[in-house]
Every structure is written in structure tokens, then in C-alpha cells.
Image: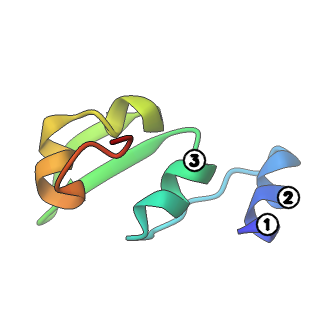
Amino acid sequence: MELIQSIRDTGITIIMVEHLVKAVFGIADRVVVLNAGDLIAEGAPDVVAHDQKVIDAYLGKSFHD
């Protein structure tokens, strides 16, 4: 994650496919969430973390609880 962060900090765009939510939300500026191939949320990690569809599909509860 440190290597990815250092590359991102240089201004290079990184597309990361990952299921570890804490890793994604900790490094991403923008998150796109798919569920069974359907787009269910898109935006800043803090906004997406509170989206009920994302909570239901991946988190089981609010990410910040």
C-alpha cells in the first residue's frame, strides 16, 4: 500500500481492483462500486461508505461504525 500511495502522490492515476474495503477507502480519491456487474455507487470514499447499497452489499454496517 505504501508503494501505491507513493506512486499516486506523484500524480499518476492508478486503477485498483480490490475487495479489501479498508485498503481501498484508505488510498482512493474516488471509488466505483460494482455488485454483480452493476454500478451501485461512485464518488469520494466517505460518500460511498455511507451509501446504503454499498453497506448492504459489502460492509454489512456503516464503514465508520
Please tell me how crowded label 2 is: few (under 14), some (14-19), or many (20+) other residues with Cα within 10 Å.
few
Which residue is disc 3 drawn over?
Answer: 28
Residue to which mark 2 is pinned: 6
Q: In this view, does 30 lie above or below 61?
A: above
Looking at the rendered structure, the kind of residue marked 3 is Ala
Placement of 39 over or under 5, stated as above or below: above
Query: What SS does tag 1 mark?
Result: helix
Q: Which residue is drawn at 58% across and 39% down?
A: 29
- Cβ atoms under marks 1 and 3 closer than 8 Å: no
Give percent across and percent down for residue 27: 62, 51
The x, y position of residue 64, in whole percent, is 38, 41
Report, in whole angstroms, how far the alpha carbon at label 2 lies from the one at label 1: 6 Å
Name the amino acid type tagged 2: Ser
Mark 1 highlights which residue? 2
Dot 2 and dot 1 residues touching (CB under 8 Å): yes
Looking at the figure, which quarter contains the N terminus?
bottom right
| Direction front: furthest residue | 65
Q: Residue at x 14, y 37 (%)?
A: 52
